[in-house]
Image (cartoon, rainbow, N blue to C red):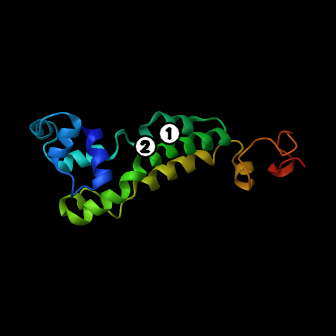
Amino acid sequence: MTTAARELFIRDGYGATTLKEIADRAGVAVQTIYFTFGNKRVLLAIAGDLEPVATMDRPWFRDAVAAPAAEVHVRLHVRGTRGILERVAPIVEMLRAAASADPAIAGQWDADADPRFAVHLEAARSLVAKPGVRACARSSTRCSSRTAAGRPSGGRAGRPTP
């Protein structure tokens, strides 16, 4: 039911999608949707992210924070956030439109609070304490613990060996 709702909300918009259409697409009775979710607003909140787990509780985030070196941390963080963006990006505009049309939906999201800030702040605090972070910050290409010549970095005063 959540997959059917998500697909229809994205395709047709929240306001234009009926519970009957969602039920038909999911192969269930409308009453099943009411019994399971209560109403369309609850279904929207659940269908918005099919993995409703706080970012900092996701295994990829914990692995990134626990990574021993900056390069590994950055790679895991980028891979994890990319997965979220690929899942959520298609519904962002639909959610904005639904919130502007329905005050009850708008009330579900605090426009001033941005949980992404807390997530990225926690990741940054963890990252700056790791070996290799200075080399990553200076690199104009990719974060790496090796120089362009293939030798390990780590010359004087934290500068890569020429």
- The residue located at (61%, 46%) in the rendering is 127
Q: Which mark is residue 31?
A: none
Left or right of 20? Residue 13 is: right
- Looking at the picture, tell me which residue is in the foreground, 31 or 133: 31
Residue designated by label 2: 55
Helix, strand or loop under label 2: helix
- The residue located at (29%, 44%) in the rendering is 47
**Residue at mark 1 to residue at mark 2: CA–CA distance:** 7 Å
Left or right of 52? Residue 118 is: right
N-terminal label among 1 and 2: 2
Q: Where 136 sits versus 103, above or below?
A: above
**Residue 161, how many percent across, how many down?**
88, 47
Kind of residue at disc 2: Thr
- Whether the residues at callouts 1 and 2 have beta carbons within 8 Å, the answer is yes
Kind of residue at disc 1: Phe
- Looking at the picture, tell me which residue is in the foreground, 66 or 142: 142
- Looking at the picture, tell me which residue is in the foreground, 104 or 71: 104
- Pointer 2: residues within 10 angstroms few (<14), some, or many (20+)? some
Q: Quadrant of residue 55?
A: top left
Left or right of 9? Residue 129 is: right
- Pointer 1: residues within 10 angstroms few (<14), some, or many (20+)? many
Q: Residue furthest right?
A: 162
Q: Where 118 sits versus 53, above or below?
A: below
Helix, strand or loop under label 1: helix
**Residue 159, how many percent across, how many down?**
82, 51
Residue designated by label 1: 61
**Residue 102, how many percent across, how many down?**
19, 62
Q: In which quadrant of the rendered image does the N terminus lie?
A: top left
**Residue 152, how many percent across, how many down?**
83, 39
Q: Quadrant of residue 12?
A: bottom left
Q: Quadrant of residue 107?
A: bottom left
